[in-house]
Image: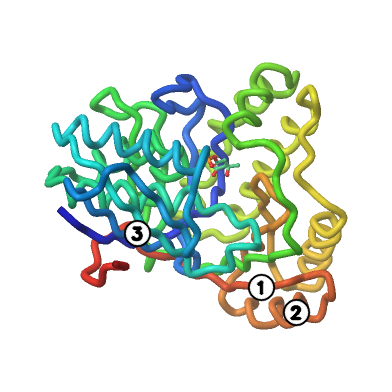
Amino acid sequence: MKATAKANSNTALIKYWGKKDEELIIPMNNSISLTIDSLTTYTTVEFSQDFLEDSFILNNEKQIEKALERVVKHLNLLRSLAKVDLKAKVISKNNFPTAAGLASSASGFAALTLASCKALGLKVNSRELSILARQGSGSAARSVLGGYVEWLVIDEKNDSSVIQLADKDWFDIRDIIVIFEKHKRKISTRDAMKLSMETSPFYKARLETIEENLAKIRQAIKDKNFSLLGKTAESDCLSMHSVAFTSDPSLIFWTGETLAIMTLVKSLRDDGLEAYFTIDTGSNMHILTLPKYAEKITGILKELPYIRDVIVAKPGDGATIVNDHLF
Ligand code: PMV
């Protein structure tokens, strides 16, 4: 009863920001993302009667309290489905700098769900896998599939799952991930989006523009229209952050460096290097561009003293089972 899975992170082009159902993690709106190849989590899970309690080691560090509780809660969901009552050992590794504060819950919960299902003998298809991964972390649902993915509030079978809009080879773009010094987020995404829904006067306005932006991104992917994709993703990012700013208390995820790079991205565009930014709940950011501009832009970024690391990602694969166990 042991299995290992690998899952990639994803970059939201239309963001998920708010839940209809807190427990089942049903989002308020559909979201669209690109699964990327450079931020990967590997997770081995084993269920055995030799284990007296669940344990979780991430990047060689034993996890306790909230981090452990979240994993145990997810294991309980999967164990109850499989009607198995054995404790588990979970070892996870990210292939990206951990101290950088890059979101790893998407790749992490996608890998944990797939490895656990396999180890428990649960036969699930990718739709069912996304429904389970979603309950660990919303954005993990999208990392189940590769390429361009839409997470549906409600699918044809009356549940919230994901579909692939296009595979990773359909439309080749680059996601340049810009990492600043570590700034630890003080609030969880779960609490942050709840606060936004409850207090931001802009929340309703954001929802009113979502359908139009989703349609634009779908069209941009279909037509391989990078300008439309980038412009719409950047605009949705600003919409999500406007909601965050106007929450009470206000949620400001940006730093001076974030703003400096936002300005730089605009000037790159003016100079003919087409690029757009998107930012989640941290100061680190993503610059979307075309393969032909990636090297030039990366060179410019690497000159900046306040940037700690730059990772160039391509469209990537969905979660898969691998044979090499971590223990
Ligand atoms: O899946 P969570 O709970 O980490 O939430 C992700 C929220 C955003 O990253 C800000 C947006 C998104 O769609 O990924």
Check residue 302 in the rendering and tell me which mark sits there, or answer none: 2
Q: Say which residue label 1 marks.
A: 310
Mark 1: few, some, or many residues within 10 Å (few <14, many ≥20)?
Answer: some
The first of marks 1 and 2 along the sequence is: 2
Task: Give how far apart the Cα atoms at labels 2 and 3 are.
Answer: 31 Å
Kind of residue indicated by mark 3: Thr
Q: Secondary structure at mark 1?
A: strand
Check residue 30 in the rendering and tell me which mark sits there, or answer none: none
What is the x, y in percent for residue 12? Answer: 54, 48
Kind of residue indicated by mark 2: Lys
Eye-nearest disc, 2 or 3: 3
* Quadrant field for ligand 1: top right
Q: Secondary structure at mark 3?
A: strand
Task: Give how far apart the Cα atoms at labels 1 and 2 are.
Answer: 7 Å
Q: How is the image coloured?
A: rainbow
Check residue 43 in the rendering and tell me which mark sits there, or answer none: 3
What is the x, y in percent for residue 86? Answer: 19, 40
Image point 57% across, 32% down: which residue?
190
Residue labelled 2 has its Cβ within 8 Å of some atom of ligand 1: no
- Towards the viewer: 152 or 82: 82
Q: Is residue 65 above or below residue 316?
A: above
Mark 3: few, some, or many residues within 10 Å (few <14, many ≥20)?
Answer: many
Image point 27% across, 50% down: which residue?
114
What is the x, y in percent for residue 321? Answer: 24, 61
Kind of residue indicated by mark 1: Val
